[in-house]
Image (cartoon, rainbow, N blue to C red):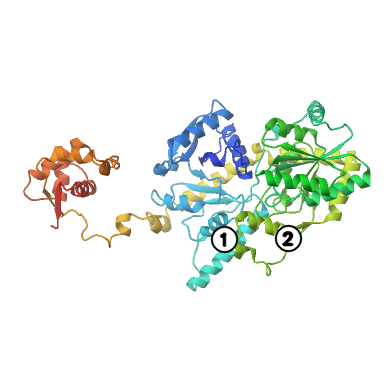
Amino acid sequence: MSTMPNAAIYFEPDGYVVTGDKIMGRQAAGNSFLRAAVAQAGDAPLWCLTASERAAQAFNTLARSIDAGVKTAWCPTLKIGKLRDVGTLYLPGPNLDHYASQRLRVGIDAFSICGITHTTASHGAMDAVASLLTAPVMPWDALICTSNAAKGTVNTVMTEQMELLRWRFGHDVKLDLPRLPVIPLGIQCEDFNFTAEDRAKARAELQIGEDDIVVLFVGRLSYHAKAHPHAMMLALEEVAQKTGRNIVLVQCGWFANKEIGQAFQTAARKVCPSVRCLFTDGKNPKSRNASWAAADIFASLSDNFQETFGITPIEAMAAGLPVVVSDWDGYKDTVPDGQVGFRIPTWTLENDNVHHFAARYEAGTDSYDRYCGYTCQTVAVDPSALTDRLTALVEQPGLRQKLGEAGKKRAQATYDWAVVYKQYQALWAELASIRAAGAQSDQVRTAPKAAPTRMDPYKAFASYPSHAVDSSTRLTLLASDPGDAYARYLALDTFSYAKAILPSATFAERALHVIGDSVDIDVATFARVMGIPAADTAMIASMLAKMGLIRLSRG
């Protein structure tokens, strides 16, 4: 078992649970990551950071469904300083800015923050990347880029944001940026070991003949936000006509709605009538495994800007399938052309001087889905190369076997979580070393205690009141029945909603008697008599004055 460091995992079920109606790639990746974290936890507890105990319980339940013996621990977000003992906070997204700001309250060197890119196309993701230039992130933080393509986008956004800051302020500003390592997503390769018996059973269930050639796509079935099916269907129709082979296209996934499902089915009938098209349920594990087991070739022609990595080609390699993918985003890293399959060249625009898609999305004229869908229409794959590569794979079983075996070895050696998670751990150890080296720097010693946008409200709104309660503020009892009055007021809904922060009835009664027994008492004297800090005394005095039980006056 690994002795390398683990991280506390920021947990909300939406980032890790894959049983909902709308499963996204980030959720599948999060669930797979959690399985790897549980496997590497060893005897140490696996920490989660959540705002609520309910979410912490959900984390414990999910972790123990993976391994009943795993130990878990909870760090509430309000007590984020506990992460000093863990060392690193892992975020399943790029939003380092929020927790970097919150970290100021416990020390900028208290722990490292490690996020990861999924989509970089949405406004939220773009804003998160741009914020890295102004948020209190440090060199001991990191944003993992899942592909070189994703890192290219991150660098472009940061460069453009830097130019804006230079224009705005008129000079260079020294910035401490996080690390931007490229680490791929991982999979559990053992999930994709299918036997000849599995293949025969799956083909029987799907009514696929022994000599039929099955081309498989796995993932969300979305022509606007995942992979437009037209090029694949068009090429397979030509391959079927050219080779005379029975081609079966299995699209294993799920539709966001009925209309999208009908669109896919209509396209299949009209674009590739010679190809038998099956749609299987990608959210059902049994159906998904049967689709993998039945396949001969995997194809995924991703052509949209919202994806950064694309995990299904790696799963296909683990299943021993040759892959045909677009030369696009993370596929450029994961699929070496001609070794485990083929990458098909892609084309798109150099710039947008016509429709101004970014401006329309920013203005709210187009939704994010429309933005993805419209820009997708400007991306094309090389049809001749696609048809040629698919034809070769359909006609040459030896080529399919050769590429499939190479892909399986590549998946196990490079993308299994047993390998990838160690890269995460090595990164976290490196961040800890950088953090330790910088702990005594002037920058750490002089770091603010809170972000300006999250400061103490009494500082932010100091211009509002006539006076502020300080150590010299005088306290005068007004209530004739102090204890009873406080209890009566505390029972009112107008006060009881804040019971968690109000003094207890017993404490308030004592405090009011102390004030009443003194002719002239100030906050500092009251604090000494009560045996509590002056800051607490000022808080209590302001609350008692709120109820009209005492009067405050300047000393």
Q: Which residue is mark 1?
A: 364
Count the marks: 2
> Residue 416 location in percent, x, y?
68, 38
- Residue found 82% across the figure and 48% down from its top: 270
Q: Look at label 2 and name its amino acid.
A: Thr
Residue 221 in view (yes/no): no
Quadrant location, the N terminus: top right
- Residue found 47% across the figure and 32% down from its top: 57
Residue 154 in view (yes/no): yes
Few, some or many C-alpha atoms within 10 Å of disc 2 (few <14, some 14-19, many ≥20)? Answer: few
Disc 2 is placed on an element classified as loop
- Residue found 50% across the figure and 44% down from its top: 88
Instruction: Kindly report which numbered mark, 1 or 2, lies closer to the viewer in this rendering.
Output: 1
Q: Which residue is mark 2?
A: 378
In screen coordinates, is 533 left or right of 77? Answer: left
- Residue found 49% across the figure and 36% down from its top: 47
Quadrant location, the C terminus: bottom left
Rendered view: 195 above or below 427: above
Disc 1 is placed on an element classified as loop
In the image as oriented, which residue stretches furthest toward the left? 519
> Residue 20 location in percent, x, y?
59, 37
Few, some or many C-alpha atoms within 10 Å of disc 1 (few <14, some 14-19, many ≥20)? Answer: few
